[in-house]
Image (cartoon, grey):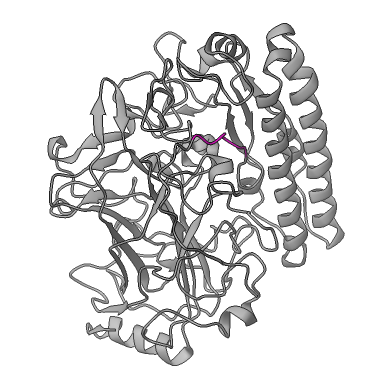
Amino acid sequence: MGRNTRKRRSSMANKAIAASAALALGGGGLIWANFYASAHESNNNGWSQNQTKAAAAQVATISCPDVGQKLTNVPQSARQGVATELANLDKQITEAYARLASTRQAQAGDSGFVQNAIVGPLKEKRAATIDRIRIDIQRVGGQFNTSLSQLAACTTQNAQTNAGETGGQQQNGGQQQGGQQQNGGQQQGGQQQNGGQQQGGQQNGGQQQGNGGQGGNGPVAADFVDITKVQGNAQLGVGQNGLPANGNSGSKGTFTTKCGTNGNDNHNTDNVIVAPGVANGAHHLHDYVGNQSNDAFASDQELAAAQTTCQNQGDKSSYFWPVLRLQDGSQDFDQNNDGGGKEGNVGKILQPAQAQLKFVGNKTGNVVAMPTALRIITGDAKAFVNGNANANVNWSCTGFENKVQLHDKYPICPQGSQVVRTTNFQSCWDGQNIDSANHRTHVAFAQANGACANGFKAIPQLQVRLVYNVPAPKLQNGTVVNPYAVDTFPENLHKPITDHNDFINFFSTNTMNKMVNCINTGKKCQ
């Protein structure tokens, strides 16, 4: 069991400028190199600001297709091998990023260096890895889509292109969204950004303000909005994703489970759903409540036998989400760790003041029991580079939740109001599988009318509401002072759209049956 990390929080308030590291879950994503040092300091390699800018003018990013999301039909017996190879793709991108960041002088002197020494070799490594994925699938009789071999090639972008200097269109990773180039699937109020970064940073309290955030990879001022100035919108969820399942008809009961706020500091950077058997498979830090044995190496048997922080001992389910940090110049226990400071996730980890876990019913009829070990991922940790298709994000403030729900901005809350993250999970199940190859197709959101489509069955919808005491950031001269942000993959620049949530069902049969009965009969239980 367990390599879960429990830690004693550091009280250090030293300057924390961490180098961005690379990664993209499932072997895809955009790698962004932080080339812009502050005006009065050199970077870690001793380069001056002007030298660094010269290198940045050549290549700032490497964009690699997301292989994992394309693998929708992997035989069960091949999934562990495929997961291992996807992790190898992540490692290869990490190594390519490290080489990109450490060869700036060579890049400045040779316009072909990045292509010849980094991108070309990366394509060869990825091609070999994708071919091993093919072998893993075909060895057990599965079908491999040969077009996936075309995903080996990655592309590069220079700083000017990444800054959106293309006739007024914003770009990030070359994604096309609704006929207009968007900045990671988002339009930032018409503002153009350098991959979410701003040049000419100033040093302030240990933060590289111009580059965005304490780690130099976000967030930036454009990621925040004063919630008191936002026009009301009562809708939860991006598009139809994550809309509340229950209403005034159907199964109207609720079941609440109380599992604490991770006061025992149970953290790790694994993801047993997406990257089983792979340490640091998430590349960012998770809070865990409920099941206390969740790490990359935990079997279903170990999870079923684990301790739980839930008051109801019939709930050994695992609930986990990326931590929220205050980037106030301080360090935390993982400042020098993978998934932490090494990958741009820096600052003080904030424990939720409240963590509310509630299950609700379906608008059109009864719900059925969830199967044991059902896995659900909601939201997309890479939504900034992947686009909004799987995004499921809601940010608000206490006192404003019924008026304003934000999806691509962090709220600045007024005095006396707390930051709120709300997530409504998929509530339709295919009736057969506890997981799927891309960890999404075995569950779905209800349709707009509340019904489940295509033979899917309604299950209790998990709703997670996290409340935080966060000092309000300040916007000054186009920068943000003391921002807060969720942990992300470095290339996702701590954008709020990347927030996500994970759940593995380990309710006992008796407790799950009680939940279903409460919901279907309109009761409120816990």
Say whether residue 135 is left or right of residue 356: right
Figure quadrant of residue 62? top right
Residue at coordinates 34% horizontally, 64% vertically from top-left?
464
Figure quadrant of residue 467? bottom left
From the viewer's side, name the closer residue of 316 and 236: 316
Provide residue 270's location: percent of width, then percent of height: 59, 59
The answer to whether residue 344 is above or below residue 155 is below
The answer to whether residue 375 is above or below residue 107 is below
The answer to whether residue 443 is above or below residue 189 is below
Q: Which quarter of the rendered picture does the C terminus lie within?
A: bottom left
Q: Which quarter of the rendered picture does the N terminus lie within?
A: bottom right
Residue at coordinates 34% horizontally, 45% vertically from top-left?
239
Principal SS element in the magenta part? loop
Figure quadrant of residue 421? bottom left
From the viewer's side, name the closer residue of 304 and 220: 220
Which residues are drawn in magenta?
17-22
Provide residue 432's location: percent of width, then percent of height: 57, 73
Q: Confirm whether the magenta stretch covers residue 403.
A: no
Provide residue 405's location: percent of width, then percent of height: 24, 47
From the viewer's side, name the closer residue of 457 and 181: 181
